[in-house]
Amino acid sequence: MAGRLQGKVALVTGAGSGIGRATALAFAREGARVVVADAEAAAGEATVARIREEGGEAAFVRVDVTRAEQVAAMVAQAVQRYGRLDCAHNNAGILGQPFQPLTDCSEEAWERLMAVNLKGVWLCLKYEIPQMVRQGGGAIVNTASTAGLVGSAAFPLYAASKHGVIGLTRSAALQFAGAGVRINAVCPGTTRTSMLAQIVQADPRFEAATRARHPLGRLAEPEEVAAAVVWLCSDAASFVTGHALAVDGGLLAQ
Ligand SMILES: NC(=O)c1ccc[n+]([C@@H]2O[C@H](COP(=O)([O-])OP(=O)(O)OC[C@H]3O[C@@H](n4cnc5c(N)ncnc54)[C@H](O)[C@@H]3O)[C@@H](O)[C@H]2O)c1
């Protein structure tokens, strides 16, 4: 059976780890040629190696999503190598210092978090969309969070950045719907990645507490978030744009 993304070219940022790696692998399994983008070369190359082991096609591009010239070059390299860009998962993100009252956060911490999580997504949209418009369409998914839909006492600046990602997603979807570019966000609940490990390091009680808050009684696997991203990028979601899809085990249904 042909994959749902057969013949497509897909790009994933933050593809060296966690949710981004799972999406890159899932895109490849659906038949897409994948541009694996990450700030960490060894991690990104490891994702490419995994895809090739499975018989898929992928290439690594090093990118710091906070740098406009690097994001422009990432999109240009994808098009140079594979001829087009059909799907993009703008997923690179950082957590910042967990459990810090916002009154104690530094200006530098604010600027770094907004640069990666919010400006990074905007820069990706800025350079991906014109390519998709030239081709007559495309599909983009930005990684927000459940902390983009409700406030978070544990991660206040992070929550602000992810609310921004959802605002940007909805606005971009409105601006480019007429050009055939669908733009959505995925909002994962707590997912078992190195970001979770970072939180658990700060407070070992976090994992059991957050598991208990998710009605399905467990945390998300990165592959479960990737499955939603693949669906949003596929033709099965052809009438879905401007949506923020919670993949959260029922967390926000409460
Ligand atoms: N893990 C969770 O519980 C969870 C929940 C909701 C949302 N998210 C979001 O999912 C996304 C992926 O996170 P994850 O949990 O897979 O974390 P992760 O730390 O496993 O992966 C993040 C990846 O992004 C890369 N990255 C970081 N800064 C970058 C930059 N400036 N430029 C390019 N790449 C950069 C890292 O090198 C890493 O490979 C993030 O946007 C995160 O906020 C995670």
Image (cartoon, helix red, strand yellow):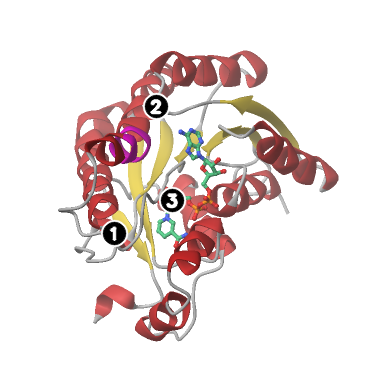
What residue lies at 59% left-to-right and 21% top-to-bottom?
Answer: 78
Quick check: 239 above or below 34? below
Crowd class of label 2 (few under 14; some 14 to 19; many from 20; radius 10 Å): many
Question: Which comes sooner in the sequence, label 2 or label 1?
Answer: 2
In the rendered image, residue 249 lying in the magenta stretch gets the answer: no
Distance of mark 2 from mark 3, alpha carbons?
25 Å
Question: Which comes sooner in the sequence, label 3 or label 1?
Answer: 1
Label 2 beta carbon within 8 A of ligand 1: yes
Crowd class of label 3 (few under 14; some 14 to 19; many from 20; radius 10 Å): many
Residue that badge 1 annotates: 155
- Point out the frontmost of discs 3 and 1: 1
Per the rendered image, the range of residues in magenta is 112-118
Residue that badge 2 annotates: 66
- Left/right placement of residue 160 relative to residue 12 reads left
Local secondary structure at mark 3: helix
Residue that badge 3 annotates: 232
- Point out the frontmost of discs 2 and 1: 1
- Towards the viewer: 197 or 160: 197
Q: Amino acid at mark 3?
A: Leu
Distance of mark 2 from mark 1, alpha carbons?
21 Å
Marks 3,1: beta carbons within 8 A: no
Q: Where, quadrant-wise, is the N terminus in this rendering?
A: bottom right
Q: Amino acid at mark 2?
A: Thr
